[in-house]
Image (cartoon, grey):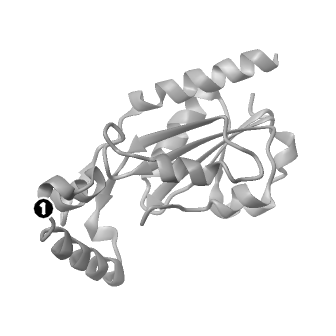
Amino acid sequence: MKDKLAVVYFSKHGMTEKYAKWIAEELNAALIDGKTAKDVEWRKYSFVIFGSRIYAGKITGVDLLKRNAFDHLVVFTVGLSDPVGTDYADLDKSLQKLKSIPEGIFHFRGGIDYTQLNMGNKLLLKMIINSLKKVPDSELTPENKALIETYGQTVDFSDRTAIEPLVSYVRELIAKES
């Protein structure tokens, strides 16, 4: 199926890459690092699964989706907050404006290792955390709460079983095409 299905990912600290590898293994798909995606001949893939991290409310690497059209596109994101209880409506709506509208969008929980952050990001996060601590708990989003709870720690919430709905969904798409 590698000639038919590709998993392309953008990962900064390894969480999205981990999910991408799991998905590629389950679906016997080609695995493509987004850093090398400019050189990929996308027409040879009937199904593309795009994965990226959520950073500051934006999806990294989304320009790849804006520049290319795909026969079938499925998107997954990885973020620090728990997908259960997190509102992704604005993010999902932004994906509906691409050349190829995703047939499925999935959100997974990743993690963070504060030791991997550069000084600029550490300072920015410290300022964000300090301002969030002044907000009443009832007004904090799940993402804000996750930032406060994990600040300064190394945490990994990744879960291989979380990919099962995406894998099943893609298998159904493939079966319909056959």
Q: Residue at x 73, y 59 (%)?
A: 66
Camera-nearest residue between 161 and 128: 128
Asked where in the image residue 172 lies, by quadrant, the reply is top right
Q: Is residue 18 left or right of residue 157?
A: right
Residue 106 location (% of width, % of height): 51, 38
Q: Residue at x 80, y 35 (%)?
A: 46
Q: Is residue 138 left or right of residue 61?
A: left
Camera-nearest residue between 134 and 74: 134
Q: Is residue 55 left or right of residue 21?
A: left
Residue 80 location (% of width, % of height): 33, 53
Camera-nearest residue between 144 and 48: 144
* Placement of the C terminus among the 4 image quadrants: top right
Q: Is residue 69 left or right of residue 101?
A: right
Residue 162 appears in view: yes
SS at badge 1: loop
Q: Amino acid at mark 1?
A: Pro
Q: Which residue is mark 1?
A: 136
Residue 9 appears in view: no
